[in-house]
Image (tube, helix red, strand yellow):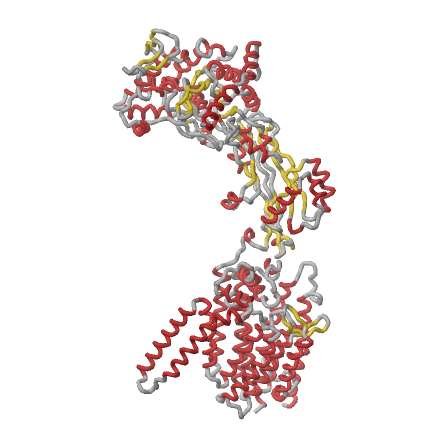
Amino acid sequence: MRVEKNNIFYGIDWILILLYMMLVGFGWMNIYAATTTDENSAILNFSTRYGKQLLWILLCVPLIILILFFNSKFYEKFASILYLIGILSLLGLFVFGKNINGAQSWYSFGSASIQPSEFAKVFTTLALAKLLSDRQYNLKLIKNQIKAFIVIFLPAFLIALQPDLGSVLVYLAFFFVLNREGLTLNYILFGSLAIILFLLTLLFSATIIISSVFIILSLLLVYFLKRNKGYLKFNWHKVISIYFVIGLYIFSAGYIFNNVFEQHQRDRFEILLGLSKDTKKIGYNTNQSIQAISSGGGFGKGFLQGERTQGNFVPEQDTDYIFSTVGEEWGFVGSAFVIILFMLLLYRIIYLAELHQNKFGRIYGYGLASILFFHVAINIGMVTQLLPTIGIPLPFFSYGGSSLWGFTLLLFIFIKLDANKGYDL
Amino acid sequence: MKRSFLLFFLITVAGLILIGRLFQLQVIKGADLDPNHNAAIKVIYDYPERGYIYDRNGELLVANQLSYDVMIVPDEVKQLDTLEFCTLLKIDKEYFKRKYKSAKRYSPWLPSVFLKQLAKEDFAFLQEKLHKFKGFYVQKRSIRNYPINSAANVLGYISEVNEFEAKNNPNFQQGELIGSSGVEKSYDSILRGIKGKKFLHRDRLNKIIGKYKEGSFDTLAVNGQDIALTIDSELQRYGELLMSGKRGGIVAIEPKTGEILALISTPTYNPNMMVGRQRAYNSTILMDKNNLDKPTFDRSLQASYPPGSPFKLINALIGLQEGVIDTNFGVYCYGGYRYGNKKNAFQKCHCDIFGGPIKLNSAISKSCNSYFSTTYRKIIDNAINPSEGMDIWSNHVKSFGLGNYLGYDLPVGSPGLIPTGKYYDNNYKFSWGATTTISNAIGQGEISTTPIQLANVTAAIANKGFYYTPHILKKANNKNIKNPKFTVPKKTTIASKYYDPIIEGMHTVFKTGTGKSSKIEGIDIVGKTGTAENFAIINGIRTQLEDHSILVAFAPKDDPKIAIAVFVENGGYGSTIAAPITSLLVEKYINRKIIGNNRKWIEKRMIGLSLEPIYRKKEQIKKLTFKD
């Protein structure tokens, strides 16, 4: 038994590995389609984007072996230190970082660049899992909640300063983890309500929203008062302060939108909500992406046959817009297949995480699932114009070594934790 | 498991929403597999050569020639020596700026025409130097060439498809050539051929990156088909020559087939004026509203004139058919016809036969107004009321193809006017009768006809009761036309036997009657002269202008080969201008040449005769009117 336990492949979940390989392999095929040109078709040409990505994929093998090589306890023990290193690497960007496309998010080594924010997710998940899995820890206490918030939002804050707001958004995914571990659902509900109210305020005038919200609130109040006579004590202070806070929020939404948001962020919202016509071709990317996807039809045009893909009509097609390649060349069947692969991966992770007796492994798995879910939903939502343009990569698909390695790390640490779960009791 | 339900639920919902969205985008909205409407595909057209046009004897009328256009792609234009460039192309700087701007406005990355139709010598010179100027290149184009210097009204011209047409017809791109008048228009689909399409795959910068689907959607160009017209180009040219200095229209038809042998409208223009770089300049002159010559107005098809005396033939035929007259019926004429008790209820007659009785034959040959007024009145009064009588008369007249578009295969025309009972019921508040409309008896009054309609009437008389719809197309792609519209005869309402006395009368016209000075040795020509009064409203006053000179004829009498109608505006008596022109054309067509000194003298006189002074006078009157 000892021998088996020392085998690095012992106990690992082959379903996850299979799903991972399918996603990475199919992803690379689409990167190849999006970046290939007629002139050079050699696969192992490292001057091309698909060649580089293939190199990154091949380098994942030693990375995976390395991850699996460590004892699963290693990750729990060193989570805090890894977190610290991660934070330091984010801080270092402000000094040594390289500015690409307006964001100082990269360390540059010769021709290769590394994006620490892709790895920060791993460290944050580890640190959060470590924090929440402490036997003394109780999320019901405000003090502990604040601790968790700090762990989550410190890297998010540093990333926001780069600025890379798309990646920041992903950190909201950790609320699912907190909720799973006992944090009241109110945070997520209030957050969602706030977003809905915000969007409604942009769509309609503040007065309309404020009056309709007040009517709904008052009706609810009257209903509850009548139903629970005496039980619910009528508290004027509370009611008035709720009204006041909501009113203030609605009126400030417009102000925040106009003064805090950047112009390009405002444009994205306005175009999505149909508030302004896209005269400056700001929605060009998404437009091209939509056209490429719909042109794929039910069964797609076939590998390397998508004329929009081959004609480079969709900007950033190998990175954030990689899904449009799938849409054009593989059609509805291929796109739905990818979504189902992701869903299966997520279900499998949650299922395995719930089997963990060890709190750390469970929390980590849950964090992994939440982050993947956010990435996939936001990315495909953006590419299909259900969400405003938020530039985050599609896990395992999008071009980019940091992103691929980040997600590979994230996933395989879980696979390792999962492989050893029986021995951690 | 309970607490993990939220994420589980959200994953499922989000997954289903995304799949639903993709279903909406890809399956419902569907694939744009039509390569014509795909931004990633560039369609290149291969324009076929337009078909040639020949006359009935195989003479080439319209051919193609190469022309060279300088094209510009504004985005590719680099810094250049404007002065050198302008000198090279023989243009001024203003032109350069204007064209550059308009090309850029049309599209910065698509080619537009910078300078049209260079001369061949200029092209050869330019070819060597042009490589220096990035963004400019020369494109070969095929344009029309007219070896004959006539028949502009028949042949028509081609123009570029404009923005409006391109929008309304998906088969055309802006700037493509399309027939826009004459035969070029009516047989455009045969002449044009089918353009070939090449689908090229391009990237977002419009750079071509290969063939689309290995060219599986590509089509080859199909050349336009050649056509042969029914026109006899020699006759056409000769007619135009005879009509020099005169305004009017001549139509000659082969009665046995309805083929149009000549379609002359003067003043005309050289068809080559509508080709090449001078086209824009020329067309403004030709289409100028103040140009009273109206060279683009086809008088043979579009001008409706009062038919005058030739119309008497139809009235006589109706009289015979309705049984109100017969060949023995006689009328007494004393220099005119009194149709009422009032002093001015009198129609003058110049037949110079005092007393009588005047019978049908001499009535035709001497063009007796009194005879036909009597006949007309009998026709109208034969019915219960004038309106009914007028309808009967009108139906007979219309069976000759009058009063409506004839249905020939050229794009312009005029219906003319043949009044019905209802027409007068509406126009005359008071009661009316045969005498009110007595002018119809002699082809004046409300009636109007076009030269081609009258030529068709003549063909129907020559055929003794039927006609083929006149047409201009003889062969398409070396095959005779089979269109039943043109190959099935149309019957008139007059029985065949009634035509013989009429033809005899028309024969007498050239033997001893109004056309005797225009008879032709060896050819039995039959016809009828006409002199139509015409009026213009000048300064609010109805002013009589010089009469139109008219003649209809066919020949030879027993085997008609040509039926012809001649209108000469303000030419005076039918016998003085229209008759000699007709006889010369008939002789030319049948004998292929003019024989005899006397005839040659007439020919020379007709060619030299100019009515310009009369037209100028007419214009003068009009101009004076405008000044007031």
> Horizontal and vertical percent for residue A121?
59, 79
Position of the C terminus of chain B, as image quadrant, is: top left
Residue A287 higher or lower than B3, as above or below = above
Residue A366 higher or lower than B353, as above or below = below
> Horizontal and vertical percent for residue A62?
68, 78
Q: Residue at x 58, y 71 (%)?
A: A392
Count of numbered marks: 0
Q: Quadrant of residue B359?
A: top left
In depth, the one of B551 and B491 nearer the eye is B551
> Horizontal and vertical percent for residue B482?
49, 32
Q: Is B1 left or right of A104, judged from the image as shown?
A: left
Residue situated furthest front in the rendering: B628
> Horizontal and vertical percent for residue B153?
53, 29
Residue situated furthest top in the rendering: B355
Can residue B182 be seen?
no
In depth, the one of A172 and A78 nearer the eye is A172
Can residue B422 be seen?
yes
